[in-house]
Image (cartoon, grey):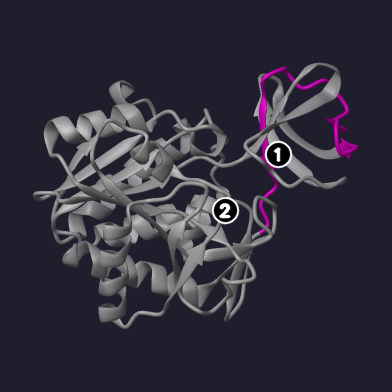
């Protein structure tokens, strides 16, 4: 869990993923020495802050987004949401501008939010929920489990993966935008026909804690049934606990795969959390374990 705690401490509000990207690259270069297969690693200005790892001869890609929801400062102490954070009076935010570190609280009403920092914060500064990690025998609770757990799962997969792409994307929480050039690069270099989205979903009236990883049949977008049925058959074969999600809202990097010019099937698979997009996101450790095991199984079978 030490590495997960380090992940959770990094700031990466959408559009500002450089810090976590550099942290991941350094970690991957060190950890990959003990992985079953040494991947080809693609990074740099050509890919902005994204990272791509190519293992063997890929048939399937796993995508995990690096960014989080948050806020941007505006004039007269105003705050503008990035993504869709849940906001309550008094929530603590952290960040840094050209004059130093910032720790402040949210004030205001449902339509206009402000910060209470004793000086003006430079306009355009990104702020994140202050981190407070809590863990016991059953749950982990913190800010940004979405999508730090998706990243953690993807890196655990790398330890045993022989064939496949593992791709860390940006901008997902605020409209996307990195997937088109990533998909083009993949399809031009080692094309795939299927993809899994390593992300975190929601606890709802049909999805519960401790019941296993969630395989999503649909959110706002609907992947192809033939592929979903294939994933579900393999999940049954695995005997790893899982549950099925059917929702009318929400989205992920799967949306951009579906809207791309490439015939790539996709499926969202991830643990579910309570208190979504708040400082208190809560995930069952059993469900996280199921997520890790399911990805390792599926990437051998797909």
Between residue 43 and residue 203, name the one nearer to us.
203
Magenta region, residue range: 107-132
Badge 2, how many Cα within 10 Å: few under 14, some, many 20+?
Answer: few
Is 272 situated above or below 7? below
Residue 74 placement (x, y as % from top left): 76, 20
Q: Quadrant of residue 291?
A: bottom left
Q: Is residue 164 above or below residue 136?
A: above
Please give the residue where the numbered disc 2 appears in the rendered image. 248
Q: Is residue 43 visible?
A: no
Residues under labels 1 and 2: Cα distance?
A: 33 Å
- Quarter in which the C terminus is drawn: bottom left
Counting residues from the start of the chain, the first of labels 1 and 2 encountered is 1
Tag 1 residue: 94
Give the residue furthest to the front: 225
Residue sitting nearer the eye, 171 or 234? 234
Q: Is residue 219 magenta?
A: no
Q: Is residue 198 left or right of residue 115?
A: left
Q: Mark 2: which secondary structure?
A: loop
- Image location of residue 152, percent across then percent down: 41, 57
Instruction: Tell me if label 1 and label 2 are in contact, CB under 8 Å.
Output: no
Dominant SS of magenta comes to loop
Q: Measuring 30% from the left and 66% from the top, which residue is drawn there?
A: 229
């Amino acid at each position: 869990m030490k590495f997960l705690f380090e992940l959770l401490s990094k700031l990466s509000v959408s559009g500002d993923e450089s810090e976590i990207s550099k942290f991941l690259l350094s970690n991957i270069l060190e950890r990959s020495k003990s992985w079953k297969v040494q991947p080809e690693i693609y990074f740099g200005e050509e890919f902005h802050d994204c990272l791509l790892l190519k293992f063997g001869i890929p048939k399937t890609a796993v995508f995990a987004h690096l960014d989080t929801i948050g806020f941007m400062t505006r004039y007269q102490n105003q705050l503008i949401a990035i993504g869709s954070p849940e906001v309550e009076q008094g929530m603590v935010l952290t960040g840094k501008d050209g004059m130093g570190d910032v720790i402040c609280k949210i004030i205001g009403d449902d339509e206009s939010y402000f910060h209470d920092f004793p000086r003006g914060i430079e306009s355009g500064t990104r702020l994140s929920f202050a981190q407070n990690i809590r863990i016991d025998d059953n749950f982990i609770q913190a800010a940004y489990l979405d999508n730090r757990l998706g990243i953690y799962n993807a890196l655990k997969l790398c330890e045993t993966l022989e064939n496949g792409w593992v791709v860390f994307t940006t901008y997902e929480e605020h409209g996307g935008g990195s997937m088109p050039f990533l998909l083009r690069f993949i399809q031009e270099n080692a094309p795939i026909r299927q993809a899994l989205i390593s992300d975190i979903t929601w606890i709802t009236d049909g999805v519960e804690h401790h019941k296993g990883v969630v395989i999503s049949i649909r959110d706002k977008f609907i992947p192809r049934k033939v592929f979903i049925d294939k994933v579900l058959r393999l999940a049954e074969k695995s005997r790893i606990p899982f549950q099925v999600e059917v929702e009318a809202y929400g989205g992920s990097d799967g949306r951009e795969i579906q809207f791309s010019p490439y015939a790539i099937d996709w499926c969202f698979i991830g643990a579910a959390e309570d208190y979504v997009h708040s400082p208190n996101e809560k995930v069952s450790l059993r469900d996280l374990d199921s997520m890790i095991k399911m990805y390792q199984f599926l990437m051998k079978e797909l």
